[in-house]
Structures are given as C-alpha cells and as structure tokens.
Amino acid sequence: MIFKNKPSNPNFSSGPTKKPDEWRIEKLNLNFLGRYHRASDVKIYILKILEKLRSILGIPKNYKIFLLPGSCTGAMESVIWSILGERKVTSLIYDYWGVEWYKNLKKIGLEVDCRKSLNGELPNIKNIPSENDVIFVWTGTSTGMALPNLDFLKKSHKGLIFSDVTSSVFIYDLPWKKLDVSVFSWQKALGSESQHGIAVLSPRAMKRIKNINMPKILSLYDYDFVINTPSLLSISDFDLCLDIYKKKGGIDGNRKVCIENKLVLDNWEKKTKFIKYFVKDPVYRALSPCYFLFTQKFKSENFFNFLHKNKIAFDIRNYRKAKPGIRIWTGPTIKKNDLIALTNWLDWSFKKFIK
C-alpha cells in the first residue's frame, strides 16, 4: 500500500452522517428519560431546545416550529397533506427525493406543473406563475445539486414556497422570509440522530392549514405540542449537537468548514481521471454532498468492499436510484485531512479495481 495514513474516521455517509468529534454519549442529558413527554418540565425542556434552534438558524419569531414524527419524510408528508390543495403546484425536480414529493402531490390529486431534470442540469426555473405554490429540494442529497439562492422567484410571488432543506439547513444561510414551509431532519450537518422531523411555517402557511379528514399523525390542524410521543433520547442528542454546532461558530463557522472540505474534492476531481462531477455547472454543485460519476468501469463490489473492510470509507456508494459513482459528505463534522487521505486511497483503489 502506498499510503499509510487512513482517514481517522471512515464515516463519509450522506446521512446519517458522522458525529461531531466533540460528541460523547456521556454528555447527553438523561434526566428526562422515562418521563411523560407532556409533563410541564419535560415540555419546557423540549420547547427551549426548539427556541435554541430558532436562535441559531435565525428563524423569524412569527414563524412556527413543529416537531413531527418520521424524520424529514414525515414532516414533508404532513405539510403536503395539511396545506396544499388550494392552488396549482410547480414541482422542481433535480433530485430523487424531489421525485418522491412529486408522487405525493399526485396521490392527493393536485394539479402539478412538473419541471424535471435528473441528468446533472437544473430544470427550467424561469417564468413560474406567481399564483402557483412551489415545492423543491434545496440541496439534492442524491445528486449533489443545490440552488445558490431563490432569485428566480419574484418578491411578489403569491403562492407558498415549500422546500425540503435537510441537506441545506445548518450549511446555507437560508432566506427564511422567502420560505413559507421548510422541512428537515437532524442527521445531516449536525451529525445528530435521525428520528424526528422539523417543519417551519410562515404566517401565510399557517393560514392555509386545513381541517380535513386525514390521518392524525399527518395533520397539522390537530397538532398539540407534539403529535405523537417523541424520543427524549434523540432530542437530548439533538440538543448536544446544537450546542457543539454553536460553539464551532454557528452558520458562518460551520459553512467555512464545508467550503474548505469541498475545495479538497474540487481539486481532486480536476486531477483524477476516474471520476467526474454529476452536476455539470459548478454554480449548482452543493457544498455537501459531492456526487461523482465513474468515468471507467470498475469491479465496483470489490472496490466498495475493500474500502469498507479496510475502514477507509463507509457508505459512499451512489444513491440506489442514481447512476454508478460515489457520493461523499463534506459537511461540518468531516475533517479536511480525512478527505485528503480518502482521495489518496480512492485513486489507489481505482487503479487496483479497474476492469
């Protein structure tokens, strides 16, 4: 083996992601385990964490934060069923999760203006009717494609703006006042445990919540603090990861880490002949994750098994519905030196397992 130095941690998965280095299980607040989640002191504990979230992300005070079951999927399905239906919906798809949300829109019989591209280029985002509600994934976790801003939407847009921001939140300084409905889970940039979802609603979105016959677990109209029993262990983990994130500089400090991490892979992609970015225009390449296509044929099973067995990289295979390649998380819990070590080993491994 040419390179002796392996990554100090092989967890480069795009979700759930690597825990922060500062994380220790002994640091979790276990005082509320085994308690009734609606007890006054437990309720105060959870609400304080949600207000900490609001402060860290700069969420406007008049936006409501919902704690929901089922990770981001549960949160997105809750807002789709509870809010949409009054207007036609423009669905922007450049990620396989965008496909899933589109399927949900069709399931409930909505009229949809579908704009789709899964070839590494952004779909047409021009001339979206002002009356339409709009739904999109800000950062496509499966494709590594992200929007740099929302300038393609007019300030006077009348419809509601929905976004799955799971791989963007805590990385991008999101323009909350332009977003009416944002949903995300905790297991990406924070490195927290998956379990619950968050939905952030603007006053305009709150007015659109419907009282209709639907499963209670999805109904925002029936929301009373939390819809079902939350995991207080998961919430404690979320609280700890929020504190670590804040100590590391909040949005500015953690975004800087992402930029530096991505630069490692940018420079590597330019030099290696074995892979290329899936996203063609650098403007739309996400800060995290980075998704690369193979440019040559490999004994891929042997390749990935070798990386796993030798603890070089876990779980970097492409999203299951995407073209063959590798997907690497470059979020703020990932070390720059680990990415450098990883790219050295990847180049060596490519040569070893080329057909």
Image: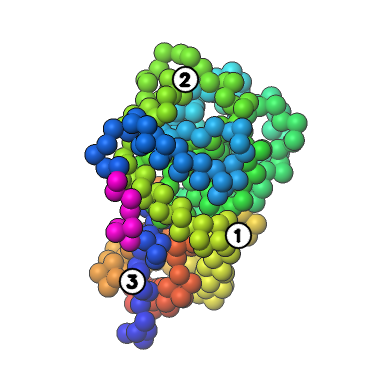
Dominant secondary-structure state across the stretch colored magenta: loop
Residue displayed at 61% across by 54% down: 284
What label does residue 70 carry, if any? none
Measure how far apart labels 1 and 3 are at the Cα level. Answer: 29 Å
The x, y position of residue 98, in whole percent, is 50, 39
Mark found first going from the N terminus, 3 or 2: 2
Tag 2: amino acid? Tyr
| SS at circle 2 | loop
In the picture, which quadrant includes the N terminus? bottom left
Mark found first going from the N terminus, 1 or 3: 1
Q: Which residue has dot 2 on it?
A: 221
Tag 1: amino acid? Asp
Rendering quarter of residue 286: bottom right
Query: Taking 29 as reference, is 128 above or below it?
Result: above
Q: Which residues are magenta?
A: 24-31
The x, y position of residue 3, in whole percent, is 37, 84
The x, y position of residue 84, in whole percent, is 54, 23
Mark found first going from the N terminus, 2 or 1: 2
Residue displayed at 30% across by 42% down: 32
Q: Which residue has dot 3 on it?
A: 312
What label does residue 252 carry, if any? 1
Measure how far apart labels 2 and 1 are at the Cα level. Answer: 36 Å
Observer able to see residue 268: yes
Tag 3: amino acid? Ile
